[in-house]
């Protein structure tokens, strides 16, 4: 079983609609959580960090559920430019001298259609 | 606008040849990561450094891969000898390497990648 799992999609979303998807992680000691966006043949770019209380950035809302060990991303009022692959990133338990292991999910593809 | 830079952007080589990829992290960042991305495996962490010291290279095939940071502005990843299965996009990322209760400064910033094809 992979440490970070995502539904690969694709999620086909009409422009203006809302889409949400989850990412599950297996290491209960994980401390940091992120969503990255990756466009085709480009590098991953930070979309948002995921705080324990949940956070919102414009049309994007991220939530963390430690009890069930998943994070979610919700995109409201989808734009054509939101079409991308969304990578879930979890940073595992950190020792005093180490960052811990960053684990990337395989990504969820979102396709926003006109 | 500070960015991670990587060279070369594209590399085509023949099996058995040495390949060297270079990365310039964002100035002031103390942690550098090397990743490999393929369609089949997704994004895999190969190695990472903090303050130029290797912290973890367990994701890297030791017999043919090596990673170094000769100085704070340069990280290198070498493959010798290269094999067709090494064909992938290799990303370098850098970060600040600390986190507080208020901030997530362990955010990573990725370079544009080196697209390697080994024939």
Image (cartoon, rainbow, N blue to C red):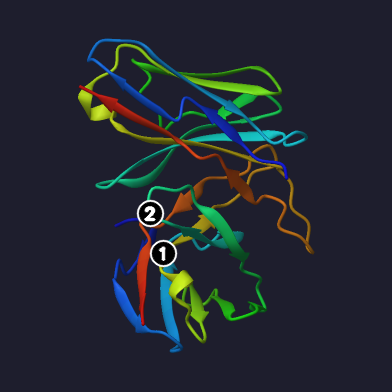
Badge 1, how many Cα within 10 Å: few under 14, some, many 20+?
some
Query: Can I make out residue A91 in this image?
Result: no
Residue B115 appears left or right of B84 = right
Task: List the residue tagged with mark 1.
Answer: A84
Q: Quadrant of residue A26?
A: bottom left
Residue found at the very far front of the displayed protein: A114
Left or right of B118, for residue A41: right
Same chain? Circles 1 and 2: yes
Q: Is residue A67 left or right of residue B18?
A: right
Write the residue at 61% across / 46% down: B109
Residue drawn at 57 percent across, 78 percent down: A60
Q: Position of residue A101 (x, y in %)?
A: 52, 45
**Few, some or many residues within 10 Å of mark 2 (<14, 14–19, 20+):** few
Residue bearing the label numbered 2? A40
In the rendered structure, find residue B92 and report the number of the disc placed on it. Answer: none
| Mark 1 element type | strand
Location of residue A107 with respect to A94 vertically, above or below: below
Look at the picture and state if A54 lies above or below B23: below
Find the distance from the CA under tag 1 to the CA under tag 2.
7 Å
Counting from the top left corner in percent of width and height, residue A73 is at 50, 76
Quarter of the C terminus of chain A within the rendering: bottom left
Is A49 or A18 nearer to us in this picture? A18
Q: The numbered mark 2 sits on a residue in which chain?
A: A
Q: Are marks 1 and 2 in contact (CB under 8 Å)?
A: yes
The N terminus of chain A, quarter of image: bottom left
Determine whether, in the image, residue B93 is placed left or right of residue B99. Answer: left
Label whose residue precedes the other's in the sequence (1 or 2):
2
């Amino acid at each position: 079983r992979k440490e970070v799992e995502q539904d690969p999609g694709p999620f086909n979303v009409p422009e203006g609609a809302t889409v949400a998807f989850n990412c599950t992680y297996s290491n209960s000691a994980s401390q940091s959580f992120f969503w990255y966006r990756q466009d085709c043949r480009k590098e991953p770019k930070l979309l948002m960090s995921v705080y324990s209380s949940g956070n919102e950035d414009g049309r994007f809302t991220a939530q963390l559920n430690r009890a069930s060990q998943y994070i979610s991303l919700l995109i409201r009022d989808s734009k054509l430019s939101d079409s991308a692959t969304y990578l879930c990133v979890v940073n595992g338990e950190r020792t005093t001298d180490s960052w811990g292991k960053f684990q990337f999910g395989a990504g969820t593809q979102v396709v926003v259609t006109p | 606008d500070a960015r991670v830079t990587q060279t070369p952007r594209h590399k085509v080589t023949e099996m058995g040849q040495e390949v060297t990829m270079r990365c310039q992290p964002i100035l002031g960042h103390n942690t550098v990561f090397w990743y490999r991305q393929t369609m089949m495996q997704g994004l895999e962490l190969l190695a990472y450094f903090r303050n130029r010291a290797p912290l973890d290279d367990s994701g890297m095939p030791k017999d043919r891969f090596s990673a170094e940071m000769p100085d704070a502005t340069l990280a290198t990843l070498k493959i010798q000898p290269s094999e067709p299965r090494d064909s992938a996009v290799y990303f370098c990322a850098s970060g600040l390497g600390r986190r507080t209760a208020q901030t997530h400064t362990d955010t990573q910033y990725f370079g544009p990648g080196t697209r390697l094809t080994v024939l």
